Amino acid sequence: MEKKLAFLGPHGTFTEQAARSFAREQPFSLVPYPNIIEILNAVHRGQADYGVVPMENSIEGSVNMTLDWLIHEVDLPIMGELALPITQNLLVAKRDQPLPLSAITRVLSHPQAIAQSHNFLREHLPQAAIEYTNSTALAAQMVSEHPEEPWAAVGTGLNVEIYPLEFAREQIQDFSNNFTRFVLVGREPLDMPSSDREKTTILVNLPEDFPGALYQVLAAFAWRKINLSRIESRPTKKALGSYYFVIDIEQKMDEVLLPGAFAEIEAIGCQVRQLGTYPFYMPKTNS
């Protein structure tokens, strides 16, 4: 029986591209959901078996909604991570005559896509109003459904295969080295394809009355020569100035080094929660 894999819809999002990559090795049935919270809730409630959500963009930083929901609302381990190259495009409805950029009155897209194309939009479409949507694909769908309006969407080129759209401009992102990290989450263990890179993500809650606690946390990894690729603070939502620290460790869970580091961290009064130990995938590009 096929397992259901939830992704951020409608069809044509970057999250669907990431979901398709994960589904190449698994008998998944891809199911679109309207937002990140509904994806994670569907997996948590058993309405979907697994979910793919964006975690971080190399230009705009972390997707706070994903992080906060995984921290505060659901207990879903991370099972895999994919770094997907992101190319943003300006899309318009198909017309008999090309739509000049100067005639576009509204640009629709997800806030992350708008931010990643900020310089292009400011230079070439200063007259256009910006409207945010839940996904890049929803913006593309809305533009395709109103061909009489001089609107444009920012999103993946996959949309021109799905909707009656065409490129007004290709590759409008402000930076060429634009990647988004997507994570696969689920309640049941999954046999993931092997990768030459493995990661472990933990959540650390520091004691409020322990000066230098964060230094001691980092020292527990440093003297063991364990490499950390990311550390980020998120509010505990309990008091002003109270934070969790999300830490990405560049190795999978083992029987000695990481348990020893976690025990040392807990000995100074910190709480450690594992968010997952998983393979990391970087798709090959033509460049």
Image: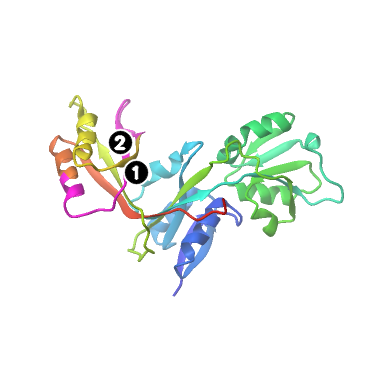
Outermost residue, left direction? 267
Colour mapping: rainbow
**Residue at x 79%, y 52% (from the top left corner):** 94
Pinpoint residue 21: horizontal percent, then vertical percent: 50, 60
Residue contact at pointers 2 and 1, CB within 8 angstroms: yes
Residue 42 shows up from this direction:
yes
Q: Residue 47, relative to residue 145: is it above or below?
A: below
Task: Give coordinates of residue 220: x percent, y percent.
Answer: 19, 38
| Residue 125 shows up from this direction | no
Q: Residue furthest front?
A: 287
The quadrant of the image that shows the N terminus is bottom left
At 16% from the left and 35% from the top, the residue drawn is 269
- The question of residue 237 being in magenta is answered with yes
Say which label, 2 or 1, has the lower sequence index: 1
The one nearer the camera, 28 or 259, is: 259
Amino acid type for the residue under numbered disc 1: Ile
Q: Where does the magenta region start and end?
A: 233-260
Q: Which mark is residue 116?
A: none
Disc 1 element: helix
Vertical placement of residue 187 versus 222, above or below: below
Q: Is residue 114 above or below residue 5?
A: above
The residue type indicated by label 2 comes to: Tyr
Q: Is residue 253 magenta?
A: yes
- Image position of 220 (left or right of 103): left
Q: Is residue 231 above or below residue 48?
A: above
Q: CA distance from mark 2 to mark 1?
A: 9 Å
* Residue shown at 39% from the left, 41% from the top: 68
Looking at the rendered structure, the secondary structure element under dot 2 is strand
Q: Residue furthest right?
A: 96
Residue at the disc numbered 1: 71
Label 1 CA crowd tier, 10 Å (few <14, some 14–19, many 20+): some
Q: Which residue is mark 2?
A: 244
